[in-house]
Amino acid sequence: MEDDYFSLNAILADNHKLSCSFTLDVEGLGYLEGGTENNIHQHSKVELPFWLAQTLSLNEFTTFPLPPPYSNRVKAALKASAQSVKLSNLVGGNGWWYRWGRRIADVLDDVPQADLLNTLLKAFVNRLPALQDLSAHHASADHTLPESSTSTGEAFRDGMEGDERELFAVGQESGKMARSWYDGSSSRKGGR
Amino acid sequence: MALPKHLQNGLTPDELTFLAEEETIDIVPLFSMTRVRLLSGIYGPFQPPSAAKVPLWLALSLKRKRKCRIVPPEWLGMERLQNLLKEERETAESFCSLPRRFIEVSKVLLDIASDDLMQPSLLRSLLKDLREVRQAKIRIGLQSEGVMRGSYLQVTNLTPLELSEMKPFLVKAMGIMQSLEPRRDEDDEDDDIGNGDGIDYGS
């Protein structure tokens, strides 16, 4: 999960909207609020993309509470059963829950930062076994048969966020490759 | 990178098989010939009742033309495999040490020269059992505390083929975990995060 300048995923993850409140009046930027007013007033709330909110917050023009996907309620749900939380619902269909959380953590102070990162890491670690099982299962599954989509694995699959989905695809791909090698016959390829 | 995506993660099973065919193996030729000089060395002479040592690819090629009988390596026997399987089942914590190209060599021999092996179908099922036991251990290992806390996975004695199957997933998962590690106090740490060092690829 690199923060490469050219990484499209990193750019897209920076685009999540964050609800910020301004700590001062800003003249002439009222259109950010979507209203007809010319100025942004102190304490008014604006939804800003993270890349803008980050700079503004680091310069203390805005402040923001921890957004809902990382709230205590989600934290509690993750603690109870990390695998049954649908991360994709929290950050929208194509969201990056981990990436965004990590970017937010970059802005936070030491203690809440460590807290948030720990939450993210724990969630990932607890969800990893299910993810691994699922990708191994899908690599070996016979796709000519109709799938039963009621199992817990499928429910987990619906709840995967961006990076988990990528990881799933990677695991499935390498599993498939190994399987086709085991199943294939070397005699057909002819010798050198 | 210019390589197609499925080749970027390391060697594929097919490539590993290709490499495995450089291993030498004993054959009993069914034809007579003097020494032959090849790029990889000089092989022969081939004199029917006596055995000769050749690379696996040559042995397979001769076998396809029905010009030799392959002498299976000593580890590819029923008793040996049964013992291995038993040992593998008894040591729950670690993997048994196998010859490096164990899986590849046993597969090509079973595919091409099964009539030179004793009870090939039994060997096949033993190999399959062995593979399944080891796969189960890999699966448990991936979900163990060691991976979760210390960012490492014990892969001692895994063969390159088994590693190639799990490597892409594992490397990516560990990269994500590492980038989520809480920051340490040093400021210069930030630059290193996400490089995915910390696991031993085991080559």
Image (cartoon, coloured by chain):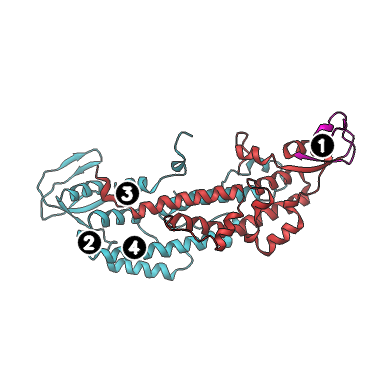
Chain colours: A red, B cyan
Residue under mark 3: which chain is it in? Answer: B
Q: Which label's residue is closer to the chain start, 2 or 4?
A: 2
Q: CA distance from mark 1 to mark 4?
A: 66 Å
- Residue B97 left/right relative to A134: left
Whether residues under marks 2 and 3 lie with C-beta atoms below 8 angstroms apart, the answer is: no
Residue A29 on the magenta segment: yes
- Residue at the spot of label 4: B127
Rendered residue at 10%/49% (across/down): B31
Q: CA distance from mark 1 to mark 2?
A: 78 Å
Rendered residue at 65%/56% (across/down): A86
> Residue A174 in the image: x percent, y percent?
45, 50
Q: CA distance from mark 2 to mark 4?
A: 14 Å
| Nearest the eye: B121 or A153 | A153
Residue under mark 4: which chain is it in? Answer: B
Residue under mark 2: which chain is it in? Answer: B
- Residue B171 left/right relative to A65: left
- Residue at the spot of label 2: B117
- Residue at the spot of label 3: B20
